[in-house]
Image: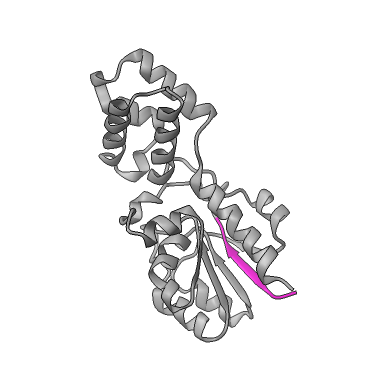
């Protein structure tokens, strides 16, 4: 069995991840962590979550060095999707919708996937913009909100600093332009049927390693 190291945080719960793939799970990747994993004998490195502003982010150079050494490096969901979109032509493998959207240029800023989370539990304390976009689209498709409300709420979300992005705060930021009836209906929908693109991509990356890379 190859040594598999997965850098995982709020995108997917560890217990659920372990049911999909047997691996060594580590906290969100920071600068130097990929180099350390390489020196510790990793054959496969999967980057899902990573730090953005708390510490220095994982460097392109260390990922490329790992690839040069013959290590399979997979990225998805969050920091992994960002780095894979930048380095796929050099051998990093990108998985999932977030990766594809960055690669195609539909997403550009790293704050699309940024959030804050409880370091002790890994639970997200804010919503990443990619999930907000998907949830708003789903709400419109279901008739919970109309296109103009969709546009207004997305603008409100984009106007907030990423740690402040929660659905109640987004609605509050929209102010009086949002009726209480529509606000309450949307908040119920966002609480019970949110779309979690990052979680789906994380699962897909782990399934890819399990099904395609393990003999």
Left or right of residue 148: residue 210: right
Please give the name of the residue rendered at 32% of the width and 58% of the height, measured from the top-left corner: 105
Residue 24 in view: yes
Residue 23 in view: no
Please give the name of the residue rendered at 43% of the width and 40% of the height, measured from the top-left corner: 134
Left or right of residue 211: residue 73: left
Residue 85 in picture, x, y percent from top left = 41, 65
The verdict on residue 121 being magenta is no
Q: Residue furthest toward the top?
A: 181
Taking 54 as reference, is 70 above or below it?
below
Residue 112 in picture, x, y percent from top left = 36, 50
Residue 36 in picture, x, y percent from top left = 54, 77
The verdict on residue 4 being magenta is yes
Total marks placed? 0
Taking 196 as reference, is 156 above or below it?
above
In this orientation, which residue lies closer to the viewer: 114 or 214? 214
In this orientation, which residue lies closer to the viewer: 86 or 58? 86
Residue 137 in picture, x, y percent from top left = 40, 35
Left or right of residue 56: residue 209: right
Please give the name of the residue rendered at 51% of the width and 71% of the height, measured from the top-left corner: 33
In this orientation, which residue lies closer to the viewer: 158 or 142? 142
Its colouring scheme is one colour
Report the quarter where the N terminus lies.
bottom right
Q: Which residues are magenta?
A: 1-8
Q: Residue furthest toward the bottom?
A: 69
Report the quarter where the C terminus lies.
bottom right
Taking 172 as reference, is 71 above or below it?
below
Please give the name of the residue rendered at 37% of the width and 17% of the height, measured from the top-left corner: 182
Which image quadrant for residue 175? Answer: top left
Which image quadrant for residue 156? Answer: top left
């Amino acid at each position: 069995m190859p040594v598999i190291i997965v850098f995982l945080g709020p995108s997917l719960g560890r217990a659920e991840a372990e049911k999909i793939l047997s691996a060594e799970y580590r906290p969100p990747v920071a600068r130097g962590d990929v180099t350390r994993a390489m020196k510790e004998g990793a054959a496969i490195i999967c980057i899902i979550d990573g730090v953005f502003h708390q510490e220095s982010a994982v460097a392109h150079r260390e990922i490329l060095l790992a690839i040069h050494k013959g290590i399979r490096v997979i990225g998805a969901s969050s920091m992994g999707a960002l780095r894979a979109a930048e380095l796929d032509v050099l051998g990093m493998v990108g998985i999932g919708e977030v990766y594809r959207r960055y690669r195609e240029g539909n997403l550009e800023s790293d704050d699309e996937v940024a959030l804050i989370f409880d370091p002790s539990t890994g639970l997200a304390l804010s919503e990443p913009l990619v999930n907000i976009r998907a949830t708003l689209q789903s709400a419109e498709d279901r008739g919970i909100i109309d296109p103009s409300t969709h546009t207004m709420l997305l603008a409100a979300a984009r106007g907030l600093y990423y740690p402040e992005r929660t659905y109640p705060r987004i609605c509050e930021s929209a102010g009086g332009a949002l009726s209480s009836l529509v606000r309450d209906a949307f908040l119920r929908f966002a609480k019970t049927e949110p779309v979690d693109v990052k979680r789906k991509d994380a699962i897909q990356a782990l399934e890819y390693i399990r099904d395609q890379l393990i003999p």
